[in-house]
């Protein structure tokens, strides 16, 4: 996520009220028309999970203490596992655990090459 942060339209965050219980982190107000319009016009930020479109967002804290939501752009356009999390190239190409194609430690390191 080295790119500039992407903020979705229609989402507004507010700091926790001083009188709110400690488990309350802040408030989120969603303008549904504005947010849905933004999401529909930005399919490049959407991923898919179990056949359904989703928008992954990160929650952070601003310098003034209020929560902030921005689009998680990490791995967009890459293959994902069953949880919707982007897979690395190694994960995509690695044989499944327990597969006979997976090398074992004894296949990779001859016993005479150990330094001890």
Image (cartoon, rainbow, N blue to C red):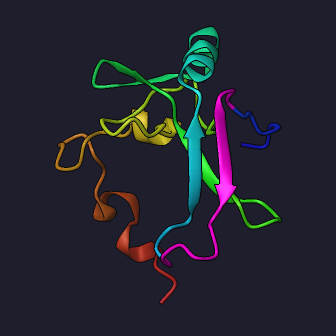
The residue sitting at 56% across, 11% down in the picture is: 40
List x then y, in percent, for residue 56: 52, 36
Q: Which one is in front, 16 or 55?
A: 16
The residue sitting at 71% across, 43% down in the picture is: 1
Regarding residue 69, the answer to whether it shows in the image is no
The residue sitting at 28% across, 46% down in the picture is: 102
Q: Please, is residue 17 above or below residue 5 in the view?
A: below
Magenta stretch, main secondary structure, is: loop
Asked whether residue 12 is drawn in magenta, I would say yes
Q: Please, is residue 17 above or below residue 72 in the view?
A: below
Q: Residue furthest front?
A: 19
Regarding residue 103, the answer to whether it shows in the image is yes
The residue sitting at 17% across, 43% down in the picture is: 100
List x then y, in percent, for residue 97: 23, 49
Q: How many marks?
A: 0
List x then y, in percent, for residue 38: 64, 17
Q: Which residues are magenta?
A: 8-22
- Left or right: 28 in relation to 81: right
Q: Which one is in front, 95 or 18?
A: 18
């Amino acid at each position: 996520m080295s790119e500039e942060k992407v903020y979705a339209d229609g989402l507004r965050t507010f700091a926790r009220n001083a009188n709110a219980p400690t488990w309350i982190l802040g408030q989120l107000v969603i303008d549904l028309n504005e947010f849905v319009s933004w999401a529909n016009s930005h399919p490049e930020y959407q991923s898919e999970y179990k056949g359904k479109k989703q928008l992954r967002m990160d929650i952070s804290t601003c310098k003034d203490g209020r929560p902030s939501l921005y689009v998680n752009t990490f791995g967009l356009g890459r293959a994902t596992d069953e949880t919707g999390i982007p897979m690395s190239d190694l994960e995509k190409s690695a044989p499944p655990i327990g597969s006979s194609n997976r090398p074992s430690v004894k296949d990779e390191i001859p016993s005479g090459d150990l330094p001890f």
